[in-house]
Amino acid sequence: MPINILMPALSPTMEKGNLARWLKKEGDAVKSGDVIAEIETDKATMEVEAVDEGTIAKILVPEGTQDVPVNNVIAVLAGDGEDVKAAASGATVEPKADAKAQSRAEAKTGSGEATGSPEPSSRAPAPKPASSGSQAAQPANGHARIFSSPLARRLASEAGIELARIEGSGPHGRIVARDVEQAKSGKGLKAAAAPAPAGASSIAPSMSDKQILSLFEDGSYELVPHDNMRRTIAQRLTASIQNVPHFYLTMDCDIGRLLSAREEINATAPKDKEKKPLYKLSVNDFVIKAMAVALQRVPNANVSWTEGGMLKHKHSDVGVAVAMPGGLITPIIRNAETKTLSAISSEMKDFAARARARKLKPEEYQGGTTAVSNLGMYGIKDFTAVINPPHATILAVGASEERAVVRGGRIEAAQIMSVTLSCDHRAVDGALGAELIGAFKTLIENPVMMMV
């Protein structure tokens, strides 16, 4: 019987994707592992591999199609020995309203089938960078999918434990059998969610689209539809500012020593065969390193809030905001406290180039313990940034400028850079936040301290 190829979930939060390009055409034979298509998520363009062998009988979703819901049939594969024409003639698009509607329907029926395999004959291609092709998505409510293995779902059902309450230890938080076994003994269970306030679900935006459009004359504007990235940014940051209690701490840093050290390091950088320097440090490279080391000096601030307890991270994984067409993305410098400035610089240049080309892998931008957002290159003096959960902090960095300061009763000129630390008050209180930004100031003003 024909095998349905479904739109895969390439990340735990993906609900829709754009089918950017087909790399196989109708009539082409494919083997397991062949790259058959490129899918655009809200953050990156990713290659998708086939998981079955056969012949592409029918492509149902043409390349260039946007907002294809996860689990929609995008093509049909005729298995070995199967009549390709017969498989193609019986192929039809089976649209599903959207991932959330599907989640609600499955929650009511308790079906909870695997992502990419809602029926025995329907299989989703496996994404190349991440193993989400083997992940399973079971909706626990109308708002999110819960990734779990078939065995874990069966064990949880037999034990009478809701999957929504189990902490997953697999890739991307996927729930596996060992997590269910731990949950049976009371370990690895999330705290029960508090009931939503009465009327909370009925809260609506201050103005509807229709009301906004009515304020402007027809023909005086162009309506540009939101792409997946812009929608995702809007949803996540709105949720962050509504659900995370932010507070802000600002300090001025004298980076005169840093600028001198940077100039000297860049001037003495080794050259390649073409006499070009192997690295060129930026002020932001020093900022990343200083933030990473500061978190090691103030480990109680290197945390993530969860309802069940505080996650205290051993390493400083620093996300760095990178602007790209239509939005931004935050690739992560892992274990930044252990890396040299030149290594951080090289890694950031690679991340920035691939981010703008939408070629980052999910593991390169998901997670992290803090973030840095630098608008100094745009001449911004200071600003506040919105925390990106699961981070508990984010550092907003402004431009350095020559300002008058008083030293020993005398007015002198100094290169001052203003930074503002946004903190999640649930995880980092005022005194702890002040300690962290103070540690950052000490390091950024004395860059030699980062070297030891």
Image (tube, rainbow, N blue to C red):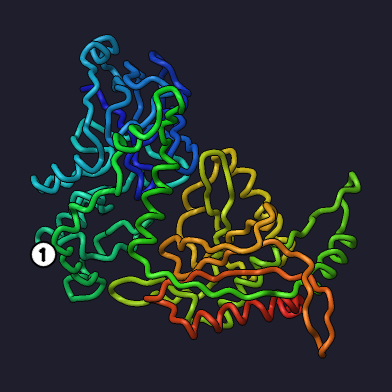
In x, y percent, where is residue 150? 21, 50
**SS class, disc 1:** helix
Q: Residue at x 49, y 41 (%)?
A: 44
Asked where in the image residue 95 lies, by quadrant, the reply is top left
* Residue 432 in picture, x, y percent from top left: 49, 83
Please tell me which residue is depicted at 29% across the width and 13% down the height of the picture: 84
Q: Is residue 87 above or below residue 352?
A: above
Residue pictured at 19% horizontal, 40% vertical = 102
**Amino acid tagged 1:** Ala
Label 1 neighbour load within 10 Å: few <14, some 14-19, many 20+:
few
- For the question of whether residue 260 can be seen, the reply is yes
Residue 24 vs residue 301, the one in the foreground? 301
Q: The C terminus is located in which quarter?
A: bottom right
When asked about the image quadrant of residue 397, the answer is: bottom right
Q: Nearer the viewer, residue 82 or 259?
A: 259
Q: According to the image, label 1 marks what residue?
A: 159
When asked about the image quadrant of residue 29, the answer is top left
Residue drawn at x 71%, y 58% as measured from the top left: 345
Q: Position of residue 268 (x, y in %)?
A: 89, 62
Q: Position of residue 2 (x, y in %)?
A: 24, 22
Q: Is residue 182 visible?
A: no
* Extreme residue toward the bottom, this view: 408
Q: Nearer the viewer, residue 92 or 41?
A: 41
Q: Is residue 246 left or right of residue 185?
A: right
- Quarter of the image with the N terminus is top left
Quick check: 73 above or below 183? Answer: above
Residue 330 versus residue 310 in the image, above or below: above
* Relative height, residue 86 to residue 395 (above, below): above
Q: Is residue 329 left or right of residue 256?
A: left
222, 20: nearer the viewer: 222
